[in-house]
Image (cartoon, rainbow, N blue to C red):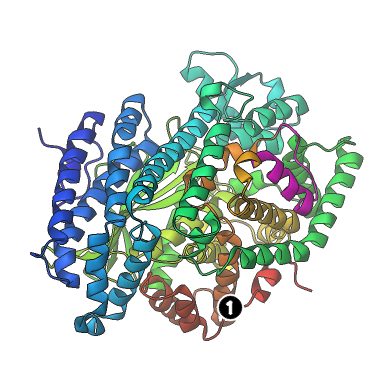
Amino acid sequence: MTNPLLQFDTLTDFQAIRPEHVTPAMDQLLADASTALERAVSADVPADYDALSATLGVATERLGRAWGAVGHLNQVADSPELRAAHAENLPKVTEFFTRQGSDERLYAKYKAVASSPAAEQLNPARRQALNHWLRDFKLGGADLQGDAKTRFAAIQDRMAELSQAFSNHVLDATDAFAYYASAEELAGVPEDAVAAARSAAEAEGKDGHKITLHFPSYFPVMQYGSNRALRETLYRAYATRASEFGPADRDNSAVMSELLTLRAEEAALLGYANYAEVSLASKMARSPAEVMSFLRDLAQRARPSAEQDLSDLRAFAKAELGLADLQAWDVAYASEKLKEARYAFSDQEVKAYLPLPKVLQGLFGIIETLFEVAIRPADAPVWHESVRFYRIERGSELVGEFYLDPHARPGKRPGAWMDNARDRWKRADTGSLQTPVAFLVCNFAAPVGDKPALLNHDDVITLFHEFGHGLHHLLTRVEDLGVSGIGGVEWDAVELPSQFMENFCWEWEVIKHLSAHVDSGEPLPRALYDKMLAAKNFQSGLQTLRQVEFGLYDMRLHTEADAAQRVLPIVQEVRAEVAVMQAPEFSRTPNTFSHIFAGGYSAGYYSYKWAEVLSADAWSAFEEQGVLNADTGRRYRREILEMGGSRPALDSFKAFRGREPSIDALLRHQGMAN
C-alpha cells in the first residue's frame, strides 16, 4: 500500500489520506526521526550546522510535515475514525519532540556549534536560528536531570492531550446544538441566512429552519432577528458551550484547571516564577508586568469611549426598541439597529456588494500590485470540494502555494486561521529549494442556490487578516528552517502583517475594485462607502475593552498561583476592572477560549493589541506615501515579509519605518486619540 503521508516529493494528496494511513506513517517517521537523533548526537556527525541539518533536520521536517497534514485534517474534516487515529498518535509525536527538545547530548552539540570558529561565518539567519535553538533547548527542559526531566516529559504529553480534548469539546458542543425555527421566529433575519437555514433543515428531512452555533448560522439571528426569546435561547446555548451546563463529557472546566496546574508546574521545573514568564521568554514583551501595564493603559485610554458607546446603546435600545433592560443577547441586535439609524446603512446592504469571487479578485490584485507577484489558480488534491488551490509566482519563479478553505461546515472547527503546510527551505539533503505552502482557513457562509457566497465587511477583514499571515509565510526569502516565513517570529509580533492587511478594507481605491453587486455587478456606491467609513469606529471603545479583557484575563491566569482553582472568579474580577457591561452570570467564555487553551496563545493573547500598535504604525507609512504605492510595498515586503524570523521583529520594523513604533497611529485609527 502506498501511504500518501509518506510522499514528500509532491504536494500532499489529501484526497487519498485515510485514517488507517496515520499510524503506519507515524510509526515509520518516528522511527526514522529517532534513528536520526541518535546519529546526530554520535561522534559520526560533527558539531556543524550543515551536518546536523542533513542528519536530523531532514527527518524531523518530514515528521512535522506529515503530522501537520494529519492535524490539519483533524481541524477541517473531523470524523470519529480520524479523531481516533490522531488521538492514538498524538502522545507518540509529542513524546518524540519533547525528547528531542530536552536531549542534553543534542544541546551540547548545538552549544559546540555556537562556540566553534565556524559559527562566526554563519549568515545572520543561521545565527538567529542557532540562538533560537539554544533558547528553546532551555525552555524544552534540556538542563533538567533525572526525575525532573521525566516529569517534564510527562507534563508535555498530558498538556498535548488536554489541549486536543479542549478543542474536541468545543467542536462537539458547537456541532451538537440545533434549533429548528419557524419562519415567524426568524422575522428580521436576512433572506440569505433564512434560505441557508431552510436548506439545512431540508437536508435532514425536517421542517422549519435549522439554526446552529456555527457563526454564519448563529450570528445573523443575533444581529438581525427581532425575536428576543430566540436570541436569548441561542445566546445561552452559545455562551455555555463545553461547560457544566451541558453533557459532562464535553465540559472543559476540569481540562482548564489541569492545564493551568501543569503549566505552572512546568514553569517551576524550568526555574520561572510562573508560566507567563516562560511564554514571554520568546516574545518581544519583557515581563508579565509590562504586558499588564500596557493593557491597563490601553483600557484607561479606551474607557471614556466605551462608556459613551454603552450609554448611547442603552438610550437607543430603550427609546427606539422598547428594551429598557438591555441584556447580552440584545447587544448585537441593538447595536446593528443603532448603526443603521446613525449611519443609514446595514451590514446586510453592504454584503450584497461583496461576493467572494470578486473580493478575492480584488485582494489578489492588491497583493500583485504591491508585492510584485502573480497569483494563479492551480490544481491539487484537496479535502473538500469547496477548497481552492493557488500558486504565487514572480516571473517564471514559483514563490509559494496555498489552499483556501473558505466555508463553514460540520466537522470543521470554528474560527479562521493560517497554518504552514510546508516551509521554505534550501533542503539539507538535496540542496534544492523547497517552496512554502500554506493553509488559509475561514468559516464564511456557504453559497445558497446558484449565487456566489456573500461576505459581510467583517468577513472581508477576516479574509485579509489571514492572507496577511499567509503572505508572511509565503513571501519569505529566508532559506533556513526555524526562521523562514513566520518561523522564529516573536509571537507578539506575528500579528503585524495580518492586522496590517486589514487596513486595505477601509480604502476607497481598494473597495471599489473588490465589490460588485451580486445581481447588478455595480461596485459599492461611494455614498455607502462613506457611511461605512463614518461607522468604522462605531463602538471601538467597547471592542478595545473586550480585547483588553481577554488579554488581561489570559495573563492573570498564567501568573497567579491559585488560578487553576479560580478560572471563573478571575474572569469576573477582570470584567469588574475592565468591562463597562457585565456578562450574564451563566456565561462560560473561558470554556471555549481555544486561543489560550488549545491554540498557542497561552500568556500571549495580548499579542493582538501589542502587534496592532506595530501594524497601525506600519500602515501609516502607506497613508503618507499612497496605499497602493509600489515602492512602499516593496520596502515593506523586503524588510518585514521576506525577512521572516531571521532577525528580531523590532529590527525589521525599524528597518521599514526608520524609527521605533508609536501607539499614536493605533489610537488615531480607532478614533480614540486625544
Q: Residue farthest to the front? A: 146
Magenta stretch prevailing secondary structure:
helix
Is residue 572 within the magenta segment? yes
SS for callout 1: loop
Which residue is rendered at x = 57% and y = 28% of the image? 212
Picture quadrant where residue 164 is located = top left
Which residue is rendered at x = 49% and y = 66% of the image? 283
Residue 115 in the image: state x and y as whole percent.
26, 79
Q: Quadrant of the C terminus?
A: bottom right
Q: Residue farthest to the left? A: 44
Vertical order, 18 against 316 (above or below) = above
Vertical order, 588 against 377 (above or below) = above
Which residue is rendered at x = 34% and y = 74% of the image? 128
Q: How many numbered marks are there?
A: 1
Query: Left or right: 429 with respect to 248?
Result: left
Residue 662 in the image: state x and y as whole percent.
63, 77
Is residue 288 within the magenta segment? no
Query: Left or right: 559 with respect to 37?
Result: right
Vertical order, 381 against 492 (above or below) = above
Residue under pointer 1: 661
Picture quadrant where residue 233 is located = top right
Point out the stretch of residues depicted in magenta: 567-586
Crowding near the residue tagged with mark 1, few <14, some 14–19, many ≥20 C-alpha atoms within 10 Å: some
Q: Quadrant of the N terminus?
A: top left
Given residues 391 and 467, the one toward you in this image is 467
Residue 447 seen in render: no
Amino acid type, label 1: Pro
Residue 274 in the image: state x and y as whole percent.
55, 56
Residue 155 in the image: state x and y as whole percent.
41, 44
Residue 303 seen in render: yes
